[in-house]
Image (tube, rainbow, N blue to C red):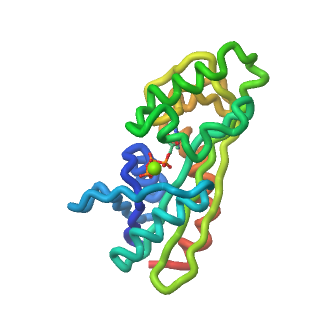
């Protein structure tokens, strides 16, 4: 596939998809590349519902194939929060720094062994005239005691992937893209992408 539209306004996601899709020879377009200001309301209760909502809304609107990513961080000691509410955890203004500080505050002095968490990414595919579907990828890890690192976006500064001492924000883009929830969801799409060919 030469080009794919991703129904997202998140520049961090776009950058990662660009990097991962470039290896497949596919150019990426996002909602930022279109004149119109579009923000699909995420009224679903699961990553799957919200990913489908975003992909299908844009696919129907322009009658083109679209993928969407709904993702977030699930913290065991917080009963799975922030989960699907990750982007607006500290308020509707969607502030990454406030969001991760809220998680750190809620965890307080919870010991390292009880700070297990995972990133979840669900990618939805919507194609005119075809049944939509989703693929889910995860990345297991733990919440750091303090934010560290400048790379990536969102909750990366407080997430330590299993097998690493560094936070996700201290990894290079290549390192993150080789282990991330987004990579793991995209891997499950590779068969479909190949099938779609040129
Ligand atoms: O790799 C990641 N590294 C760090 N944080 C991440 C990651 N992946 C998702 N996240 C966080 C960011 C945001 O707080 C939420 C996604 O929310 P989500 O609604 O899917 O995205 P969004 O509103 O930013 O953009 P959009 O809906 O237009 O795709 O999870
Ligand atoms: Mg969103």
User: Which residue reaches farthest left?
Assistant: 35
Q: Nearer the viewer, residue 3 or 106?
A: 106
Q: Does the rendering let one see residue 39?
A: yes
Query: Quadrant of the image for the N terminus?
Result: bottom left
Q: Nearer the viewer, residue 39 or 160?
A: 39
Residue 179 horizontal/vertical position (percent) = 62, 44
Residue at image location 41% in from the left, 61% down from the top: 7
Residue 86 horizontal/vertical position (percent) = 54, 40
Q: Quadrant of residue 163?
A: top right
Residue 123 vertical position relative to residue 96 in the rendered view, above or below: below
Does residue 7 appear left or right of residue 109 in this picture?
Answer: left
Residue at image location 39% in from the left, 66% down from the top: 5
Residue 49 horizontal/vertical position (percent) = 58, 61
Q: Quadrant of residue 97?
A: top left
Query: Quadrant of the image for the C terminus?
Result: bottom left
Q: Does the rendering let one see residue 163?
A: no
Residue at image location 54% in from the left, 25% down from the top: 102
User: Which residue reaches farthest top?
Assistant: 109
Residue 88 vertical position relative to residue 27 in the rendered view, above or below: above
Residue 25 vertical position relative to residue 180 in the rendered view, above or below: below
Residue 146 horizontal/vertical position (percent) = 57, 16
């Amino acid at each position: 596939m030469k080009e794919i539209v991703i129904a997202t306004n998140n520049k961090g996601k776009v950058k990662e998809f660009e990097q991962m899709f470039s290896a497949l020879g596919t150019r990426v377009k996002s909602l930022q590349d279109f004149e119109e200001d579009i923000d699909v309301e995420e009224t679903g209760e699961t990553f799957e519902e919200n990913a489908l909502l975003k992909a299908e809304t844009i696919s129907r609107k322009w009658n083109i194939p679209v993928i969407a990513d709904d993702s977030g961080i699930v913290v065991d000691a917080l009963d799975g929060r922030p989960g699907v509410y990750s982007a607006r955890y500290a308020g509707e203004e969607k502030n990454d720094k406030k969001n991760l500080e809220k998680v750190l505050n809620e965890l307080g002095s919870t010991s390292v062994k009880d700070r297990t968490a995972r990133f979840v990414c669900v990618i939805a595919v919507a194609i005119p005239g075809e049944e939509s579907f989703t693929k889910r990828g995860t990345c297991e890890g733990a919440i750091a005691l303090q934010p560290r690192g400048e790379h990536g976006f969102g909750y990366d500064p407080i997430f330590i992937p299993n097998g690493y001492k560094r936070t996700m924000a201290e990894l290079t883009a290549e390192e993150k893209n080789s282990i991330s929830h987004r990579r793991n969801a995209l891997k499950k799409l590779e068969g479909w992408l190949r099938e779609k060919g040129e």
